[in-house]
Structures are given as C-alpha cells and as structure tokens.
Amino acid sequence: MDVVLLTLTVLSLAAAIGFGVLSWRVGREERERSIARIASLSTAMDPVSEGERVAVGSVFESRADRLRSRPMIKVGVGAAMALALVVGGIIGVRTGSAPAAPVDTVRSLPLELVSMRHQREGTTLKISGLVRNPSASSPVSGVTAVIVGFDQKGEFVASARAPIEFTPLAPGDESPFVVAVPNVPNVAKYRVSFRTADGAVVRHVDMRGQAQLLQAER
C-alpha cells in the first residue's frame, strides 16, 4: 500500500509539473498573440489604399476557440484532477482505518469478594477471604486487603492490612488473603476494602450477599 501511495504521489507531482509547463507555454503564446494584435491594430489604423483589405479575423480569435484547438490542455487538467482525487481517497481510507492508540482498551471491573470469615487468637482478630478478578476485566497488581474494626457503638477501634497472596491477578483468577488485627478484644464488626500500593481504592462488590458482623467476646 505504501508503494502504491508513493507511486500515485509521484505521478500527481509529475502531472502538476507538466500542467505548469503547459500553462507557461500557453501564457507565452498569449503574450506573443498580444504583441501581434497590437501590431495588427497599428497597421489597421494606417491609411490604406482604396480596395485594400486588412484581415483581422485571426487576430481576435476567441479564447474558447483556442482552448478547443488544444485538446491536450483539457486532457492534462482531467488527469491531474483524477490523480488528486485518487491520492486523496487513498489517504482518507488509510487515515480512517488506522488503529486507535491502545489506551485503556480493556475496562477495569470491580473485584469480587467471593468469601470471608474470621477467627480469634487471643486478642488478635484474623480475617481471611477469597477475592476474584472478573474474566472480562484487565489484570491488576499490588492489591492490598484492608480491615477496619469498630466497637458496638460503631466507633473506630483499629485497622490492619496485608497484600493478597497472588499478584498480578489475571482476569478470571482468584486469590486468598489473610489480615491479622492485633490487640482488639472489643471489636464488634469489621469492614474490608482493597487498595493499591499507592493507597488508591480498588472497587469491589460483595458476592456473598450479606454483611459480616462479629459480636464482641467478653
């Protein structure tokens, strides 16, 4: 395709140059005709003897007649216009069919929280679960699970975080996670979220269908 486009471009340039030369020649002939016209008019203005006639028809030849007598001019104009249209059409097709820049071609979907449970080890609360990256999403990496604990009044008690076990998480893959929150004997409920290494929130949906509540052990 590049060779064809280059060939058509060269032909278009050659046609334009040829048409320019042809236009220069026509202009030169016009100047010569103008000089001849002035000379003929000067001769016609001089006194002539009786019966003498001056032929002036060829001097005032119409422009349309001159163009009709030069069919190559019209052929050259038609060829140049045809080549310009062909080159323009090919460039337009190549531009329209060019692939777009591959920026975010795959939309990032929320992670899916498949399961989650908790257990106590003394005053430490350990939360484990399973998170899945949807098959229609893009790979994610550097994901960290964050647990925030609250007391019975809903007030903040403590938080902890830990990276998920598998990274990067490819589309359709699952990864377990385990987060231990130490020294929290009075935690009544907790909340889980996911973040990237720089702290940005990674959206997720709870596929379990219910919230996790934990009654404080006294």
Image (cartoon, helix red, strand yellow):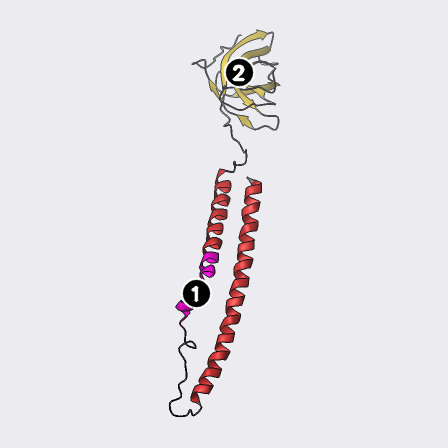
Residue closest to the eye, 185 or 94: 94
Instruction: Name the foreground residue: 1 vs 186.
Output: 1
The picture places residue 142, in percent across and down from the top left corner, at: 61, 23
Q: What is the quadrant of the N terminus in the image?
A: top right
Q: Main secondary structure of the magenta part?
A: helix
Residue 75 at least partly seen: yes
The residue positioned 57% from the left and 41% from the top of the image is 2
Q: Residue at x 46, y 57 (%)?
A: 75
The answer to whether any part of residue 186 appears in the image is: no
Q: Is residue 106 magenta?
A: no
Tell me where the magenta segment starts and ends, as one range: 59-77
Decide: is 213 above or below 23. Answer: above
151 left or right, relative to 166: left
Where is residue 51 shown, x and y percent of the image?
A: 37, 89
- Marks 2 and 1, Cα distance to the nearest angstrom? 85 Å
Q: Type of residue at label 1?
A: Ser
Relative to 198, 59 lies left or right = left
**Image point 46% across, 51% down: which residue?**
82
Instruction: Identify the amino acid type marked 2.
Output: Val
Residue 146 position in % (x across, y down): 57, 20
* Residue at the disc numbered 1: 69
Percent x, y of residue 20: 54, 62
Marks 2 and 1 in Cβ contact (< 8 Å): no
Mark 2: give few (<14), some (14-19) or many (20+) Cα within 10 Å.
Answer: many
Residue identifier under label 2: 131
